[in-house]
Every structure is written in C-alpha cells, then in structure tokens.
Image (tube, rainbow, N blue to C red):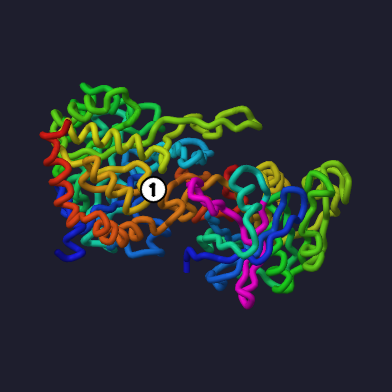
Amino acid sequence: MTAASRLAVELPGLNLKNPVMPASGCFGFGDNRYAEMFDLNELGAIIIKAATLKPRAGNPVPRIAETTSGVLNAVGLQNPGVDVILREKLPVLHQKYPTLPVVANIAGATQAEYVEVAKRMSASGMVSALELNISCPNVHEGGMLFGTDPQIAQQLTKAVKEVSQVPVYVKLSPNVTDIVAIAQAVAAGGADGLSMINTLLGMRIDLNSRKPILGNKTGGLSGPGIKPIAVRMIYQVSRAVDLPIIAMGGIESAADVLEMYMAGASAVAIGTAHFNNPTACPDIIKALPSKMEDLKINSLSELIAEVRGGYPNDD
Amino acid sequence: MLTKSDMRIIAQEELAPSIYRIVLYGKFDYAQARPGCFVMLKLPDGTYQLRRPLAIAALAPLQETITLIYRVVGDGTHLLQQTAVGAQLNILGPLGNGFPIENVESTENVLLVGGGTGVPPLMLLAQALKDKGCKVTTAIGFRTAALIFGEKEFEDNGQLLLATDDGSKGFQGNVGQLLATQPEQTYTKVYACGPNGLLQMVQTRFAGTTAEIYLSLESRMACGVGACEGCVVSTKDGTYNKRVCVEGPVFNGREVRL
C-alpha cells in the first residue's frame, strides 16, 4: 500500500486524500497568512468559518483569553454573511485550490435562517459538504440552543437535509448532559455525519479588574485540555450511532489523530494547535505514516473498519 | 516572507523593574520587517497555547538579530524572563503592516508619542525616521523614573520629551498634559503607540491639525495571521471590523474607533 492510500478516507461527500482539515473558525475562508506558510492543497479538506444569512459583527473584544492547556474564545460568528461569502470568499478559494474539498459551516438564529443559508451554500457548486453549527456557545440567539434539545436538533437537521444538495454533518455541542441522545436525534433527522466536539462553555476573571476577561463574559474552551472529553464523547457516540465522525478537540499531533480514530473517528479537524504551530496540519499529515507504522496500522480506512466493526462485540 | 524559525537568545537584560530586553539571533526576513511590525513568540512550554505578540524594538540585519522589549505581566512572560541565554525560541514573523514611512520626506517635522510597553516599536521608528533626515520629536510617559527605558535611543534620534506621573523625572503628569505645555508646532505626521487612553488623547489633540495620525494598537491575539478574528477593531468608514494583526496594528488615527 502506498503512503498516499494509507491516509485516504471516504466519507459522505468527502473523498479525502488525507483526513486532516482546519476546523471552522480557525482558518477563516483560507484568506489569511497561513497560506503563505504552506500549500493548502496539502490539506485533506478545509472547513470554512461559519456563515450566517446576514453579516454579523461578532462580540466585543477581548475575544481571546488563554487558560492552562487551552484557549477561551468568544468571537461570536463574525462573518460577512452568506451572499458575500459566496460572491467574494469562496470563488477565490475555489479558484486557487480547485481540488481542495470545502466544508461550509453554517449557523443561524432561527430554523428558517439555517435553511436559507444551507440552500444557498449547498447550491453554489463550491462546497462538498455542510457542517451544521448547532453548538456555538458565543451567540445569544440560535447556536447552541439548537444543539442542546434533541427534538429541536432533529427538526433542524431534517429541515436542512430537505434543502441541502450536499451531505450534512451536524456539529455537536459538548455542553449537554447526554451527547448520545443529541447524536441519535440528529441521526434520526437524516444527518450524513457528525462533527464533534465544539468548545466547552467557560470563563476567566481578571484579578485586577475583578471582572470577566472576555467582552462576552463567557467563551468556548478549546485546546489540548479538552481532548479527553472529546475522546470520551466520540467513543460514546460512535458506539450508539452509525454515522461517520469528524473528530476535533485539542488535536495537535499524529498520535492525537490516531487516538481519535481509536475512539471512533473517520476524519479529524485541527483548531487551536494552529496558534502555536501555524503548520500544524501539514506537520501532522507528514508525521502520520511513520506513527501508523510504529503502531502497526496499515491504513486509516482499515483502522476505521477495525474500530467501528468491532463494536458489536464490545463490552 | 512570513516564516517560523528557531532563534537563539543571545542577550536578555532587565531595563527597568519587570521590563526586559531580549536579543534573538537567527533566520528572519529582515528585509520585510519594518518599524511597527511584530512577531509572535512561542513560549518554551507546550502548555501555553498562545504565542505572545511582541513589537520589534530593533533590527540588525547584518548581525542577524532582532530585539524585543516586553513587560512581565503573567506566567507566560515570567517564563520568558526565566529562559536562559543560549536557548532557542520559535519566532513567527514579521507580522502586521507597520508604520507607513515610505513617503516621509527629509524635511518633515514628525512627532512620536508613547507610553509604557507602547514605547518599544517607537524606538525602531525613531531611528528609521532620523535616517530619512526628519526632525523627530518623541514624547513618552512612564509611571515613575525607575520605569523609564529607551531614553538614550530617542535622544540619539532627535528631541526627547519625558513625562512621569509622579514627577520623579521630566514633566509631572501624563504625555497628554506634557504636550499641552509645548508651544504649538506643525507636525506633518504623528505616530503613537500605547494604551487606548493615550491613543485617544492623540486623536483628540491632533484632530484639528493637518497632521497625518498613525496609531499602533495593542490587542489580545490568538493567530496573528488574520485567521481567527480575535483581535478586531472598528473603523469609522465601515461596519465590518478590521483585524489588528493583518490590517494593523497601525491604523489611520482619523479612521480607527477606539
């Protein structure tokens, strides 16, 4: 088996040469200076920043606070709106990297908004899949509210599936008591896949001002500190729901990627790791084959089959 | 070209209580770096998830060194201060737009205004403007005499006006009050870096003049490369926020909303 086919994975709508993609919100629309440091064609795919129907200015600054082994952010889905993204952002990305699969993250304050954004985005011919963001902790209407009630999550998934021309991955919130119930609900709503986990709701307080550091007061916690939570949730969900999972939550190395696979993932997204290491994605892609060799993993697709095929006999 | 490379610490010294100067040697795009640009410094401990944005205070392309000046404010900068000469630090840069100085003429009368950790990028700027032949006046403020740094660098490159809050050296009061005592002058350009209060003072004071105003902003940042939208600022001519790390950190003082 060639090194290339060892990393190839196939998910609904996503035929990937490798499983590594930048996570939504950590890579803009590819319109940033990361592209000066490596060729984006090396990526398995790219998940672009959340699109909403209308432009969103986002939250007041500060939007970023560091924590031990993590980062809190409260950007608040700042974006120029779906029409500008389709007119100005995606064509540039598509023209520069015509073969790079694009996953479009979509968000909204109401079901009607999600449906409208899904309709326009999926009809563009420039995206391979949608990532339905029902888990943003930093907006005051919509966002996470859709991802914490199974019935609402199911309804929304169903409505988006009805209009989408590309497969739909639902991005789950870890800020729930039972993530399996939500995963089952969106599966029943017709989701083609899951992506998990979004950030955990957190807060930091400035000792001098005695007030929350973030302008939004609360923010979403990401980074290696949340990786064990992601691993646990992916493990639980993959045993209960027969859908492919794009795993995210503190991944920063090839070893982390393989740990996610062993929990039940089919692909991975990298977020916070970019901030310390702007070439985290290509570095991980390069490191994967030898790490797999060390662990006697022939190919990722075989690892998926082994892990998820092994579930019926799981104790 | 934007690069991340390991640079070796060849000097680290205390300039004033909790203010340190660190000199790094190694590969860096010296030709692209200009006054007002910054780097993102990776701390030598993987538990820190964010690099630290630090302005370039001096550049020596022939010696292949860059100088950064920082204040110890938390665990991360404390760790940096504890890092020994000889150790390697990973540097991402050069970043940011820098101060616009291409069109500055040798006949110009320019003013630099700074305070606290806003002073370091002005050191590189003062030298560049003096090299162009400009008449450079620098007004900088500190809390107290013991915290002053950069005096010699600014005096070497023009006239220095110094203020301390407690009057222990120079003018007693802040930089705004210091400038108010100065005879009216026609500056063609005013460059400032420091806390928002100082920048707002500069906006107000020079609003009615013909001077071009350039303000360098500080912000909490995550990526430094325009990807995360963490460090945004608004401008008067648009509703969509600008990114301090890419469209800044230097903004037209007549447009940026502080």
Mark 1: give few (<14), some (14-19) or many (20+) Cα within 10 Å. Answer: many
Identity of the residue drawn at 46% across and 53% down = A276
* Left or right: where A278 falls relative to A194: right
All told, the count of numbered labels is 1
Position of residue B1 measured from the top left corner of the image (x, y, whole percent): 47, 69
Front-lying residue, A104 or A171: A171
Say which chain tag 1 marks: A
Residue B192: x and y, percent? 68, 54
Q: Position of residue B95 (x, y in %)?
A: 52, 60
- At horizontal 24% and vertical 45% (from top left) the residue drawn is A261
Residue beneath disc 1? A26
Q: Quadrant of residue A254?
A: bottom left
Q: Is residue B200 visible?
A: yes
Q: Nearer the viewer, residue B40 or A259?
A: A259
Quadrant holding the C terminus of chain B: top right
Left or right for B115, reference A233: right
